[in-house]
Structure formats: structure tokens, C-alpha cells
Amino acid sequence: MNDHTFDPKKFECFVDKNLIELRVHFAKPEMTKDELLDALAFGNFEEHKKNFTRIAREKQKNKRIKV
């Protein structure tokens, strides 16, 4: 797992471990996992995941080039 704070995998693990607490926090007991992920990921979790993957690939590519 990537050590980056905004890693989508970390978001998913956090929601899985804190589902009930998050529903209480948002005062919406009916919230689904997907809705909670969207709420935590700046409005759109799938878009966040795509952006994170793109940026991570660019950083990895740049790291290889600077050898």
C-alpha cells in the first residue's frame, strides 16, 4: 500500500473500519459506503482514484527518468 495520505486504498480501509462512526458523524445513518467515500474524497471518489493513479504514475515515471 502506498504511504501517501490520499491513497484511495487508505480511504476505503478507513471507511470499512469506521462505517458506523462516519454515518453518525454525518448524521445520515442510511449512507452507503460509496456515499461515504464520495464525502471523504472531495465529492467524487472514482474521480479521486483516477487522479491519484495518474499523479502516482507521473511521479514514478519522473523518478525513473532522474536516475
Image (cartoon, rainbow, N blue to C red):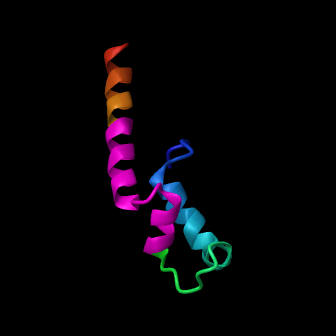
- In the rendered image, the residue lying farthest to the bottom is 30
For the record, the magenta segment spans 34-56
In terms of secondary structure, what is the magenta stretch mainly? Answer: helix
Q: Residue at x 48, y 57 (%)?
A: 41
The image quarter containing residue 29 is bottom right
**Residue 27 point in image, percent of width and height:** 64, 79
Residue 16 vertical position relative to residue 10 in the rendered view, above or below: below
Q: Residue at x 39, y 60 (%)?
A: 44
Give the quadrant of the C terminus: top left
Side of 65 relative to 25 (left or right)? left
Residue 36 vertical position relative to residue 59 in the rendered view, above or below: below
Q: How many marks?
A: 0
Q: Residue at x 31, y 27 (%)?
A: 61
Side of 65 relative to 41 (left or right)? left
Q: Residue at x 51, y 80 (%)?
A: 31
Residue 64 vertical position relative to residue 33 in the rendered view, above or below: above
**Residue 26 point in image, percent of width and height:** 62, 73
- In the rendered image, the residue lying farthest to the front is 27
Q: Is residue 40 magenta?
A: yes
Q: Is residue 54 magenta?
A: yes
**Residue 8 point in image, percent of width and height:** 46, 54
**Residue 36 point in image, percent of width and height:** 51, 70
